[in-house]
Amino acid sequence: MIVRYFARFREAAGKEKEVIEIGPHSTVSRAMETIRMMHPWLAKEQNVLIAVNATYAKPDDRISDSDELAIFPAVSGG
């Protein structure tokens, strides 16, 4: 699966994207566990938005190795 990082997450990861392996019948939540083990700084982030194939995703959404997961900080404004 391709994981893409955006905004300050790209800077923290030191890369725009990387490939991770996920098991069959995986979920967004499981993929995020793997990513957080690889990048402990991400575990401290409270406001994270996740998209799968350019659509916002929920933690229990199913994903596969052919999907693209995007991780970016939630944006707030006023």
Image: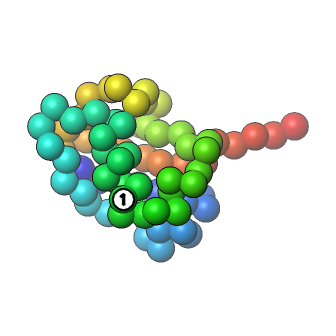
Q: Which residue is at the far bottom?
A: 14
Number of numbered callouts drawn: 1
Q: Is residue 68 left or right of residue 8?
A: left
User: What residue lies at 36% left-to-right and 63% top-to-bottom?
Assistant: 38
Secondary structure of the residue carrying numbered label 1: helix
Q: Which residue is at the far right?
A: 78
User: What residue lies at 54% left-to-right and 68% top-to-bottom?
Assistant: 12
Q: Which residue is at the far left?
A: 24
Q: Are there few (<14), some (14-19), or many (20+) residues within 10 Å of tag 1? A: few
Q: Which one is nearer the viewer's eye here, 20 or 36?
A: 36
User: What residue lies at 43% left-to-right and 47% top-to-bottom?
Assistant: 70
Q: Is residue 7 left or right of residue 33?
A: right
Q: Which one is nearer the viewer's eye here, 9 or 31?
A: 31
Indicate the position of residue 39 as horizontal and vertical percent values: 43, 63
Residue 77 visible in image: yes
Color scheme of the displayed model: rainbow
Indicate the position of residue 31 as horizontal and vertical percent values: 31, 45
User: What residue lies at 50% left-to-right and 53% top-to-bottom?
Assistant: 43
Residue 53 visible in image: no
Q: Which residue is mark 1?
A: 37
Q: Three-letter amino acid code at disc 1?
A: Met
Does residue 11 sit above or below 48 in this rendering?
Answer: below
Indicate the position of residue 53 as horizontal and vertical percent values: 35, 37
Quarter containing the C terminus: top right
